[in-house]
Amino acid sequence: DFPTVRGMVIVGGNAFARLLAHTLMNLGRQVVILDRSASLCRHARAESFPVCEGDALSVDCLEEAGTRYADT
């Protein structure tokens, strides 16, 4: 389940994106990681991030990731 308040959607689940997500969460921000790679999504889930697996160019996927509530 994805955050329903203002937060950030990070497109990409690579090591840098996950490091950025950790940093943002430590600053009190909510994040969702969005990636179409099943492998990168597994890594992000293993680090306890909310993850949306899909294409960032898909309106349905962006909606599922919570971009309506994201400020960044």
Image (cartoon, rainbow, N blue to C red):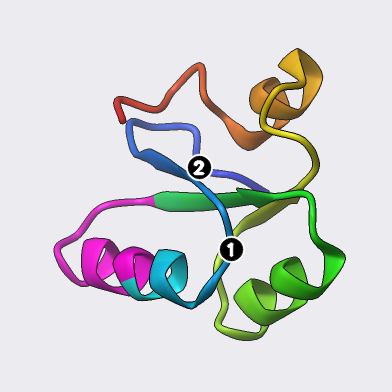
The quarter of the picture where residue 22 lies is: bottom left
| Residue span colored magenta | 20-30
Residue 47 is left or right of residue 39, and the answer is left
Task: Specify which label sits upstream in the sequence, 1 or 2.
Answer: 2
Q: Is residue 32 above or below residue 48?
A: above
Q: Foreground mark, 1 or 2? A: 1
* Magenta stretch: includes residue 25: yes
- Residue type marked 1: Gly
Q: Which residue is mark 2?
A: 3
Mark 2: secondary structure: loop
Q: Which residue is mark 1?
A: 13
- Residue type marked 2: Pro
Mark number, residue 54: none
Q: CA distance from mark 1 to mark 2?
A: 17 Å
* Magenta stretch: includes residue 57: no
At 43% from the left and 64% from the top, the residue drawn is 17
